Each structure stands twice: as structure tokens, then as C-alpha cells.
Image (cartoon, grey):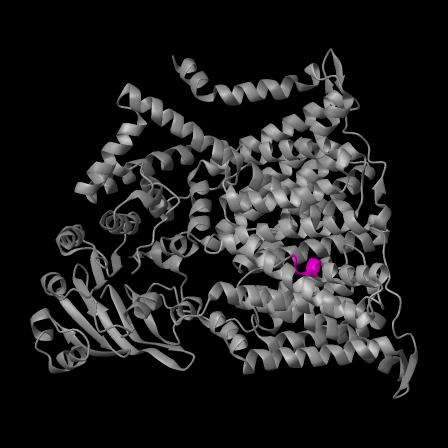
Amino acid sequence: MLLKVEKLTKHFDGLVANNHISFDLAEGEILAIIGPNGAGKSTLFNLISGMLPATSGKVFLEEEDVTGLKPHSMAERGIARTFQTTTLFDELRVMDNLAIGYRVRTRTGFWDALLHSSRWRREKEETEAKVMEALEFIGMREYAYHFVSTLTQEAQKRLAIGVALMSDPKIMMLDEPTAGIIQDETDGIMELILRLKERGITVCLIEHKMRMVMDLADRIVVLNYGEKIAEGPPEEISCNPAVIEAYLGGEHIA
Amino acid sequence: MELFLQQVFNGIMLGSTYAMVALGLTLVFGILHVPNFAHGNLYMLGAYVTFFLISLYQFGFWAAVISSMVILGVVGMLVERFVYRPLIGQPHINMFISAIGLLILLENSVAVVWGTSAKRIPHPYPDTVHLLGITTTQQRLIVIVAAVIMIILLQLFIKKTIHGTTIEAVAQDREGAQLVGINVNWVSSMTFAISSAFAAAAASLMAPIFMITPTMGALLVMKAFVIIILGGLGSMQGAILGGYILGLVESLGGGFISAAYKDVFAFGALVLILAIKPTGLFGKESN
Amino acid sequence: MKYNKFLKQNWLYLLLLIAALSFPLVISSRYYIQIMITALTWAMAALSLNLILGYTGQASLAHAGFFGLGAYSLALTTKAGLSFWLALPLAGAFAAFIGLFIGLLTLRTRGHYFAISTLCFGVIVFIVAGSWIEITKGATGILGIPKPTPIPIPFIGELSFTSQTNQYYLVIFFLLLFLFIIYRLVNSLQGLSFMAVRNNEVLAEAVGINTFTTKLLSFVVTNFLVGMTGGIYAVLMGGVSPTVAGSNLTFFWLAYVIIGGVATMAGPIVGAVLVTFLMEYMYSLGEYRLAIFGLILIMAIIFFPRGLVGVFTRLYQKIKDYFGGIRGGGAGQNAAKSRKANETL
């Protein structure tokens, strides 16, 4: 198992956001986490990526216990993530954003920068090459010098995935990669996610657009009120009575 | 024992000022998220206004104190409108810099107008009082009693009146308050007025006891920050309790610890506590 | 060709460098040279403040505290007989070492809390400098710091620093050194990490940057540089007193950075030189000038938060875009083209 989540629990001031959630993530698959608003999906992402400390429970990456590590250590070990509200370095250019994404794989420090050491030169060239490659991959080559604030919402979504991709992650956790963009544009993002899978990257995503989830996901985990209520392949989930029940109060499935 | 009681009494008096200054600061910093570093300078300005009214216009002491509170209330509203409101929604550093600009402006304006030499307001109540075996002046007693009354009145205002509850509403959720029709700008303005008037009251009450100088608020504002961070940001009870505790510690500590270093301990304690709990003693985790 | 291109891109900086180097030769007034020496010393302090404040986004208000630590360190070591050229890096190292310790304590906090926490430390330094009489001589301070040790030059004699002109060049030398260090640092992958932390600390952490050690590095380098600046100031003044650690100095340097242009190389220097000379010019106004200065700072942050250099570069870019657009294929048109492409994507 690439990633193993074991009985993760999170309390906020007595409120239970996640309760004993367990699931596995196999190498190369696309796992979707769905559930009505407030089901605790984003909190789960925050716990796995180390943004929040869990009240109890464990996370294993390739059999190694990584519970409680800081986000930057998680990224270093190969878990990259994006955020629900598109989060980028909005004062910087597209290429800088990508270069920062690769920073975790470079070691240039104070003395390298000051003395222009061989490492400084090597890593600079390496970063530039990686940035070019990522720009190609997300289809944004002509925007390298643009500032993030001038990009469309869809381009920002692509860039956020690009930034996460820069660290050569094993797992990419995408929190609503198509939130806030129109239907036509989601196809482009879907295609991008499929190409991530082709690259051998395991994807775990939170998504509300059911058509997209059904098309993309190999497996689905359903959360409701902080509990896992179902898990299985898409066709099984779409006729699971507990899932339908959970969604009837909110949005209808598919 | 007598010396100890004397020090406790002085500590309570000092604490009364700290509590009033910290209350004002916690209203604007904890509730409106404005790091009003010039709060100590508003305190200083309040003392000067009282001095000015008494010595030049022969105001009676209480008339001067109340006028000073009103004037500083207006100054506080102007400060909110012209120094801080234009910077809402910008990086936090910007508001900080604006605060520092205001601090420099106030300190030097007062120095220009009234000079840098220390001033003293003639004692309105110079008689000594014997109480529980300690000897003190009426003025010191008045500071304590007046402070307690004002603190209680403020609590009642915030908990019991419509205007007061809007302050709490804005504190909890600025956008939500706006949605339900609260005029957030007016609430900010009012909060600044109350905060500055409180600083003026504290300064005016203390003015006959201590010298007044243009730099009298510099350390005080930092102590107030220490109090409100330790007491919990935006918590009025914390500010009051913290104010009295700091007053007592300083007064009692003055005997045991060298007077020169007593502030080092307060500021050092803040650095250490924030190192252990970076969001303050009562800071909360957010999702 | 290569040199031509270099000249074309950097003509303004070269011009400024020539102006700075020829200043004491052109200006004969000792008074103005002295003000320039002070202004450039403040520029150095503002430059290092810009590293932690402008590039890394952390408002350290302990800057004067570390300046003071460097100044006292140099005063004590040179009076004990150590050569200035050893005492100066030692002053920087001392400030950096204390900075490492204080950084470990304060950098876990964010935003206003960091500013308040560092301000508290700055005030502690100020109080200790005035109270620890055995070491610091209290409020009077330490006087009689020897001038920088002369540097022997074979066949010619030695380079001494007793003349005002030579002291001016000493300051220019260190200013250029600081510029070099900060330029290289911010224009590297390490500098990119600083800016990532400034722009969005949560995201920086999420993409794998250890934000704590990144901030710590910036803080330590900042304090090394300002410690050295304190040492230079002490040796030029010939003495130190607790005022060198007063938070008023921090506030002034902060103002230079903001007025000049935050997170720019030239901003702190422009701010320091301009404001220092402006203050001298308004000398006849007495204390009014400080009140005016406070007002200028408030207006600057509200109306020109990017500072003079920011306003200038924007203007320059607009002019360039305009003329580029006329000639065709310039930056303006390119921008328009890519905007169009952006819409159709």
C-alpha cells in the first residue's frame, strides 16, 4: 500500500470533524473523496498533509509512520497537495511559482547563493529545465513571465497543479481541482489529471462534480458528518443506499 | 507588613491604569485587529489635554478629565478614519507602519506644542488618608475608585446596550455583521472613541501623581500589549485581570528585584510565552 | 557587444556609483559629507531590515537592538585592544548569534505577534544597555573607541581612517558589500524561498519549504549585517550610548524602507539618503520636522505603499510599453497579445 490512513480523528472544540476514518491508497490509482458540504473532506486532507495535527489516528506512507510530520516534510516525502480556494504565490510570476515548487528538491543555501558555487549553477539550470517541462505539461508555455494575478481562473487551477507536480510527488492530493470554473473547462482539467495518472502519479481528489468523479475515479470514499459511510468502485457507490440517503438532503448524485 | 500593604495599595493603583489602558487596546487590537501602537501616545495626549485645560483655562479637575475624554474620543475617531481605515484588507505590516507613523506624529506634535520638559498638574486632592494602617493621598484612592467605576460602566455598555453588542458582533464576524445590517465603519469609529477616551481618563487620573512628558506612553503601550496577549486577545476580563496582576507584580517586585530591570521581566515573559504558544495564552486553533 | 548590453541595462546604476564615489571630491563642504556618511550608514541598516521585512515579510522591530549589540560589541572589543578588522565581523557574528537564539524563540509567531515579540526584545536590549553599568557604563555609554586600524600598503605607506574622506569611502565600501550580499541572496533559489514565505507562508510550507528555517536564515543574515552596521557606526562616532538601541531608530529605518520602496534593492538607500537630507533641510523647523515625518510615513503607506522606487519603475515601465507599442512588437503589444491568448485558452 502506498498510503494507509488509520482511524484518523479530529476534534475542534468538542466538534468532531473526522471520526475514525481509515482507507488505503494503492499505487497508480485515482481515489475520489466525496460527500456533502461539511462532511470533513478538507479537514481530512489537512490531517494527511500535516497542516493540522490529528487528535488521534495514524498515517503511513510506504509502511513508514508519517503521522504528525510538518507539511514541508510531507512534501519532501512525496505527498503534494493543492487547495480548495486556488492558492498560488500571487505576487510572483508563473515561472517563479513553478520554481518554488521544485525548491524542495534543491539544496542551494546562503553560501551557494553568495559565492555562486557549482551547486548554485547546477541547480539553477536544473530548475529552469524543470520549469520548462512543467509549463509544457500544463500547457502554459507562453505564460511563463505572466504574473499570477493576470491569469484566468482555469489557468490558475492548472498552475496550482503544476506547482504541486514540480516536487516529483508520489501522491497528489487535489482539493476540488475544478471548483469555480465552467463545465467546458473542467474537461481540460480532467484530461490533465488523467495525464498525471499516466505519469505514474497516484491521485487522491476531493470533488463535487459527480460526472467527473464517475469518469475519473478508480475508487470512491464517501464521507458524511465526519464519518466514512461507504467505499468502493464508482458503479457500486452510485447505487449504495447509504450514499443516496446522505445526498438526498443536499445535492443529488449524478 | 505595613510596607507590604503600602506596596499592594500602590500596585492596585498602578494596576487600575494598566487595566484601563489594556482594555482600550484590547478593544481595537483584539476586536478590530488594529495594532494601535500609538495607543500610549493617545494616553499621553490625554494627560496633556487635561494639563492644558487646568493650567490655561482654569478648568476644575473633573471638568478637565471629562473634557479630555471627549476630546480624545474625537481624536480616536479621526485616527480610525484617516490612519487605519484606508488600510483595511492590506498586508498586516501596512497598518503597523501607519501606527508607527502616528506614534511619531503624536509624540513630536506634543513636544512642539508643549515642550519636552516634564509637567505636573497641581494636586486637586492633596490631603492624606489613613486606611487599614497605611497612609496615602486622596488622589490615589480616587484613581482606584474612578477606574473601577469606569470599567464596570464599560462592561455594562458592551453587554447591555445595542451599541455595545454591535462591537461584539463585529468582533466575532466582521462580514456577517455587515450582512445583518450593522454599520461596521460606525462600530469601528465608536470603538476607537471609547478606547481613546479610556486612555485619556487613565492618564488624567494619574497626572497629578506622576510627571507628564511626551514619552510617558512609550513603555506603557508595550506593557498593555503584554497584558492583552497574556490575557487573551479581545478578552476584556483578561485585560482587566492582567492589568491588576502586572500592577501588583511591578509594585511588589520593585522591592525585591532591581527597579531598572523590572520591565525586562515583563517583556522577557512575553517573548518566552509567545515562543511556547505562538498565538498567545488563549489563542485558538483554526481549520 | 556583451559590454554594450551590460552598459545599456545598468547605465543608471553605474551613474549612481560614479556619483557616490566622486561625492567627496565634488562636494567640499565637510558638513554635507558628514550628513552623507550618516545617511549611508542608515542606508546599510535599512538594507538589512529590507531583507527580513521586505523580502521575507517578517516585521522585525528588534533591528535597533541588534544594531546596538553590534555597536557595544565593537566598542568593548576594540577598547580591549582588538583590531577593528577583526572586531567588526565579530560584532556581526555576535548579533547574528543572539539573533539565532531570539529567532528560535520569536519566529514561531506570525504577523503582529512577531512584531510585538521582537519589539519587546529590542526594548530589553535598550534597558540592559542603560542599566548594566559595569559593562556598558550606563547612560553615559562607552567613549574613546579608536579609529579603524590602518591598513598597511606595501611601498606606499598605509591607509588610515582618520580623515573624513577616507571614512566616507569606508562606508561606501561596506554599503557596496552589503548590496552585493543581498543582491546575490535574493536573486537565487534561496531568495525565492524568502519571497515564497512572504507571499504565502501556508502554501510555501505545503510545497515543501521549511518556512521556519527559511525565516531563521533571513533573520540571522539580517542581524549579522545590522550588527556590522552598528560596529561601523560606533567606530565612526567614537562612542556608543543606549540610544543606539532605541526603538526610535528601528522606526526610522522602517520609514526609509517604506518611503524608498519595500523589497527593492535601491529603495532603502533612496529612502535613507532622501529623508536624511530632507530632515537636514528642514532643520530650522525644529521639532516640527519629526511630526511632519510621522505624517509623511502615514501618507506614504496609504497612498504609495510601493515607495518611490516602486512608483518610478512603474512609470518607467509604462513609458517603455508606450514606446515599445509604437515601434511594434514591444512589451506592450506582447502583453496585449498574450491577454488575448489568455481569453481564448
Q: Is residue C160 visible?
A: no
Q: Residue at x 22, y 74 (%)?
A: A36
Image coordinates of residue C120 in percent, x first then y, are 67, 58
In front here: C113 or A7? C113
B184 left or right of B134 in image: left
Q: Residue at x 62, y 61 (%)?
A: B76
Q: Is residue B260 above or below residue C94?
A: below
Q: Magenta part mainly helix, strand or loop?
A: helix
Measured along the vertical axis of the image, is residue B250 above or below residue B109?
Answer: below
Is any atom of residue C75 visible in this view?
A: yes
Is A177 displayed left or right of B214 in the figure? left
Q: Residue at x 23, y 59 (%)?
A: A179
In the rendered image, the residue lying farthest to the bottom is B132
Examine the image and state in which quarter residue C188 appears.
Answer: top left
* Rendered-image quadrant of the N terminus of chain B: bottom right
Q: Tell how many labels.
A: 0
Q: Is residue A48 left or right of residue C272?
A: left
Quadrant location of the C terminus of chain B in the rendered image: bottom left
- Location of residue A206 (image quadrant): bottom left
Residue C286 image offset from top left, x and y in percent: 77, 39
Going by the image, does C102 lie left or right of C138? left
Residue C250 is a magenta residue: no
Point out residue B134 in the picture as x, y percentages from the top left corner.
90, 83
Span colored in magenta: B38-42
Q: In this orientation, which residue lies closer to the viewer: C158 or C61?
A: C61
Question: Residue C165, position in %: x, y?
Answer: 73, 21
